[in-house]
Amino acid sequence: MKKNKQEKKKSGFGKFLLGAGVGAGLGMLLTKKTGKENREALKNKIDELIKKVKEIDSDEVKKNVQEKIENIKSELTDLDKEKVLKIAKSKAESIKNKAEELVEYVVEKGTPVLQKTANEIREKAIIVTKEVLKKLETEEK
C-alpha cells in the first residue's frame, strides 16, 4: 500500500521530532545526577517511549512494547521501595532482563525509530539499579 504525500510528510516530520527528542534525551542522560534524579530521568524516558509507541501503526508491536514497558515500570517502582539488599538485587536483575527483552523485541520487529530510545532505557536502567544497590550495600554496612 502506497503512502500518499501527506502521510509521507507526517512520517518525515515525526522522524525529525523523534530525532530531536532523542538528542535532548541523550543530553539529559549524560549529565551527572543523583540516584533520585536518575530514577526520575528513567521514568521520563519510559514515558517518552510510551508516547512514541502510540504513534506506531502496528497494533501488535504497540501492545508488546507497552506491556514490556509496564513491566519495567512496575519493577522500578518495586525497586524504589525495597529495603532488603537480597530482594533489591533480584529486582535489579529483573529490570535489566526486562530492559534487554524490550531492546531485543524492538530490534526484532525492525523498528529503528524506537531502538535508540529502548537502548537508552536499558542503559539508564542499569545505572539506576547499580546506584540503588550501591546505596543499599552502603546502608547495610
Image: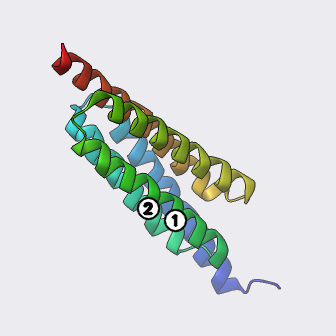
**At label 2, which amino acid type do we have?**
Glu
Q: Distance from label 1 to label 2 (Cα)?
A: 5 Å
The structure's colour scheme is rainbow
Q: In the image shown, does 71 or 29 lie closer to the viewer? A: 71
Q: Report crowding for label 1: few under 14, some 14 to 19, many 20 or more residues within 10 A (C-alpha).
A: few
**Residue drawn 38% across and 50% down?**
75
Quadrant position of residue 59: bottom right
Name the residue at 74% across, 54% down: 108
Q: Secondary structure at mark 2?
A: helix
Mark number for residue 67?
Answer: 1
Q: Name the mark on residue 70.
A: 2
Q: Is residue 59 left or right of residue 44?
A: right
Quadrant where the C terminus sits is: top left
Report x, y in % for residue 92.
41, 36
**Crowdedness of circle 2 by 10 Å Cα count: few (<14), some, many (20+)?**
some
Q: Which mark is residue 126?
A: none
Residue 28 image point, x, y percent = 33, 41
Left or right of residue 18, residue 74 in this image: left
Q: Is residue 21 above or below residue 6?
A: above
| Dot 1 and dot 2 residues touching (CB under 8 Å) | yes
Residue at image point 59% right, 66% down: 64
Secondary structure, mark 1, is helix
In this rendering, does residue 71 appear at all? yes
Identified by mark 1, the residue type is: Glu
Q: Nearer the viewer, residue 36 or 1?
A: 36
Residue 6 in the figure: left or right of residue 69? right
Q: Residue furthest right?
A: 1
* Residue at left offset 26%, top offset 47%: 40
Query: Is residue 58 in view?
Result: no
Number of labels in the image equals 2
Instruction: Residue 78: give x, y in percent of width and height.
Output: 30, 48
